Image: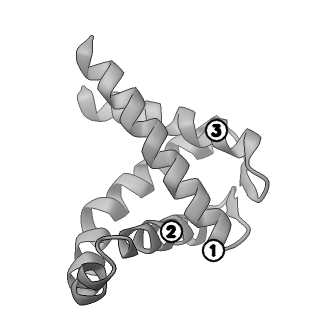
Amino acid sequence: MIFLLRILLTAIVVVFLSKFLPGVEVAGYGTAIVVALVLALLNLIVKPILVLLTLPVTIVTLGLFLIVINAIIILLVDAFVGGFEVSGFWIAVLFSLLLSIIQSLFYSIAERN
């Protein structure tokens, strides 16, 4: 149940950010749910591998390279999901930062209730 709630909240945030960020487009609400599912899957499988492979760079940059890894994950979602488009790397960085911040706010509110 928590997983479904998180997927729906992420889909809502994806739609919200696509309305306000130039360079991010989502075809519809169904596409946003697919984006949320693929994002969860890539964060589960690909992100730990990328973090492990780039551990020295992450340590040297005091963890800031994780922002780049998040942007790469967003660009992978863009490649896998039709109807979801991110125009470039820096837009992906901004999208991933805002997505992480808003998700953490929503998740903390959802866990309290």
The residue carrying mark 3 is: 15
Asked if disc 1 and disc 2 are in contact, CB closer than 8 Å, the reply is: yes
| Residue at x 50%, y 54% (from the top left corner) | 97
**Which quadrant: the C terminus?**
top left
Of the image marks 3 and 1, the number of the one nearer the N terminus: 3
Amino acid type, callout 3: Val
Q: For residue 106, which quarter of the picture?
A: top left
Quickly name the residue at label 1.
89
Residue closer to the observer: 63 or 32: 63
**Residue 50: image x %, image y %?**
30, 79
- Compute the Cα span from label 1 to label 2: 7 Å
Label 3: state its secondary structure: helix
Q: Amino acid at mark 2?
A: Ala
Most foreground residue, 97 or 13: 97
Please, is residue 18 above or below residue 2 in the view?
below
Q: Secondary structure at mark 1?
A: helix
Image point (69%, 40%), residue name: 28
- Per the image, the residue denoted by label 2 is 71
The type of residue carrying mark 1 is: Phe
32 or 102: nearer the viewer: 102
Give the mark nearest the N terminus, 1 or 2. 2
Instruction: Give the camera-side residue of 104 and 24.
Output: 104
